[in-house]
Image: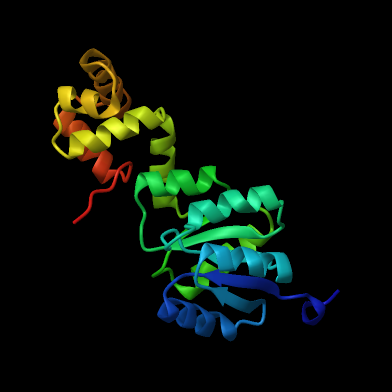
Amino acid sequence: MNKREKRAVRILIVDDHPVVQAGLTSMLATQGEVEVIGSASSGEEALRIIKQDMPDILLLDLRMPGMNGIDVLHALKEMKAPAKAIILTSFETDENIYRAVQAGALGYLLKDTPQRTMLEAIATVHAGKRFIPSHIAARLAERMLRSNLTTRELEIVEMLAKGLTNKQIGSALEISENTVRNHVISVMAKLEVSDRTEAVAVAIQQGIIQISD
């Protein structure tokens, strides 16, 4: 089969910003090796298109209202869809990277990625291999060395970030103050910090928790 007969990689863009959709479509439209088959503004819409049109690659935003990018990745596993996902986002916190890769993303790029790199990523992921830039891969490796915080520990870190005391946290969660203290000690050990203030700072910095403006 010669190059002219080779089928273009079929791409679905999933992003809730019309400007991003238009920009990516325009960027990729001139490339013969890829074909943008459409775009979706939400995770729910993306899954409907995937079932109907079976794209090869998703360029998937992480943060969307309703079903976000991580939710879409989990849904793809349930569908056993052949589409492979490349996260294309403005965010590169350690936790975002970790959760995306754990959920099945094969690529992780920032939205200001040059066209050449994006095309390289599409070709690599289409071949079934991972494409994660070295600086992001280093952060992922560091994140994977840390143990996961449990759901309860995440709840407690979020409450610590709001300035609640152990007693207040215990009351809110209906557990003893001593149990809260043990959870806080576990969190500090996992995040490799020496006090609760530093634990909150590290959790925010690494994207483990997010605080409202």
Task: Confirm whether residue 24 shows in the render.
Answer: yes
Residue 189: quadrant of the picture: top left
Q: Is residue 141 above or below residue 59?
A: above
The answer to whether 138 appears left or right of 28 in the picture is left
Residue 22 screen position, x and y as percent: 48, 83
Residue drawn at point x = 30 percent, y = 20 percent: 186
Residue 5 screen position, x and y as percent: 82, 79
Residue 202 screen position, x and y as percent: 24, 38
The answer to whether 21 appears left or right of 10 in the picture is left
Q: Residue furthest right?
A: 1
Residue drawn at point x = 45 percent, y = 81 percent: 23
- Quadrant for the N terminus in the image: bottom right
Residue 38: quadrant of the picture: bottom right
Q: Is residue 115 above or below residue 166?
A: below
Q: Nearer the viewer, residue 75 or 207?
A: 75
Task: Confirm whether residue 105 shows in the render.
Answer: no
Residue drawn at point x = 56 percent, y = 63 percent: 44
